[in-house]
Image: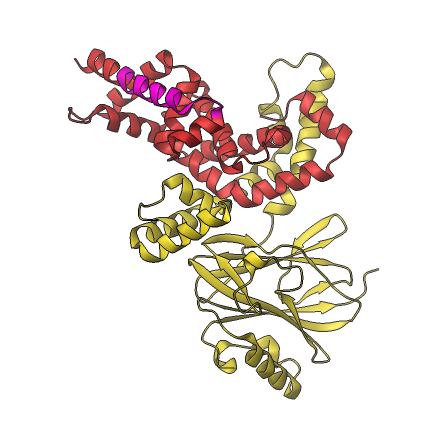
Amino acid sequence: MDKCPGHFALSRYLADELPAGERREVSAHLEACERCSALLRDRAEYAELAEERYAAAWQQAVAARPHEAGRARRPRRASFWVFRVLVPVAAAAVILALVVPRLAPPPPVRYKGSLSLQIIAKRGERQFVVSDGARLCPGDALRFSVTASGAKSYLVILSLDRRGTLSTFYPNSTTPPRLRARSGTIVELTGAGRHVLPGSIILDRSQGREVILLLASRQAFDPRPLQARIRAISSKDPRAAERLTGEKLGFSGAVRAVPIVKSPCL
Amino acid sequence: MFPSSACLVSYLERGVTSQQRRTRELYDRYSGLIYSKCLRMLGNKEDAADAAQETFTKAFCAIDSVRKHESQLSWLYRIATTTCLNFIRTRRRKGAILLEEVGGLVSQGRQPLDAVLQQRVFQALQERCDDRTLEIFVAFYLDGMEQKQIAAQLGITRRAVVKRLARFRELVAEIYTSEVG
């Protein structure tokens, strides 16, 4: 692609909705064109900032004054009294159900390389963001959302349980090929913006402390030696993995550890 | 704006699962971009938040109308454009970025417009332009869509888009002449 892509194409790239071929072309162009990369960075940052502001505005409007919001937005020509009551109340309920759980979460954790990770747990109909030390139950479904700012990001998400068993959450057998790097052992994310990894991880019946580890880098890497080092470090001190850093692992990328506690739910 | 009563009744009858999931996916993926667009069109954070909220509410009601191979972003952009143009009309907002764009079009090779004149030109444009032409203007100049993309989205030919854009520019020039002399 010699010509710079238009603003709309860049927005679609950011929203991850370009067809694969076009996406590859834009990616290749971004690597060569500083102007477009800068524009995309600005857009990504702005879109993220906008989302936070938008979320805050919704939360404030809906949580603080749902009944007033309902009155202000009631259709002017309600044909009979039922809709004067039913429409605002039902709509407020719908919007609360749809939006509040999504808007309430604390800000995602940022780490080196301006990537951020958010883990969202679903238990029945309830969804919440997993913070450090969160208590989770067997059967909880975890989804991972990564916000990247670079053209390419590579990552692996692991889990280390109290017995020292290291499992790989991502990539897994259901990770689509478009998200796998050539080696197949790491996830490759193309483009800036938020990437919600497909599928969810269902927590098994084991109990006790566990650590979810994210290893990420702007360059492709081989996770196997890093996994061996994690096993070695945790065999000496089971809770050392909670304090893991790139330096301790001899890894030039970013490391993020999220400890959780698994216990049965009543 | 809340969903219309018909939309709500249909929603309550059909249950939440599929519609809720699809709306959430849309929200997750596009809320930032839609808010940014509304902010660019309205130039006011509070209005932009309201317009984005209204856009997603409308999207929620009309989610079944997204065509299979259609870009969801352009579909949402279109809803957001209509919503923002309505805000500009009903709330008498200035439509900051629209004014700048119109001002830019008008002042090519001419004396630049001050804010008051920009506002008058834009007011006159709204009175003399039909909704579809304004929509095409926003899609082309603000959203950066290509003529063929606009044509596909609106279900018209590319030639019709070109004609409408040309007519728009002529109209801007006419209004400029009558306002500025």
**Horizontal and vertical percent position of residue A184:** 57, 67
Q: Residue at x 64, y 22 (%)?
A: B4
Examine the image and state in which quarter residue B120 appears.
top left
Chain A colour? yellow
Magenta segment, prevailing SS (helix, strand or loop): helix
x, y (%) of residue A175? 62, 59
Q: Give residue A109's position: percent from left, percent from top.
A: 53, 61
Is residue B104 positioned above or below A160 on the image? above
Q: Residue at x 77, y 28 (%)?
A: B13
Residue sitting nearer the eye, A197 or A257: A197
Query: Magenta includes B163?
Result: yes
The span shown in magenta is B154-171
Total tally of numbered discs in the picture:
0
User: Could you tell me which quadrant the N terminus of chain B lies in?
Assistant: top right
Q: Which quarter of the picture shows residue A120? A: bottom right
Q: Is residue B147 visible?
A: yes
Q: Quadrant of the C terminus of chain B?
A: top left
The chain drawn in red is: B
Q: Does residue A5 belong to the magenta stretch?
A: no
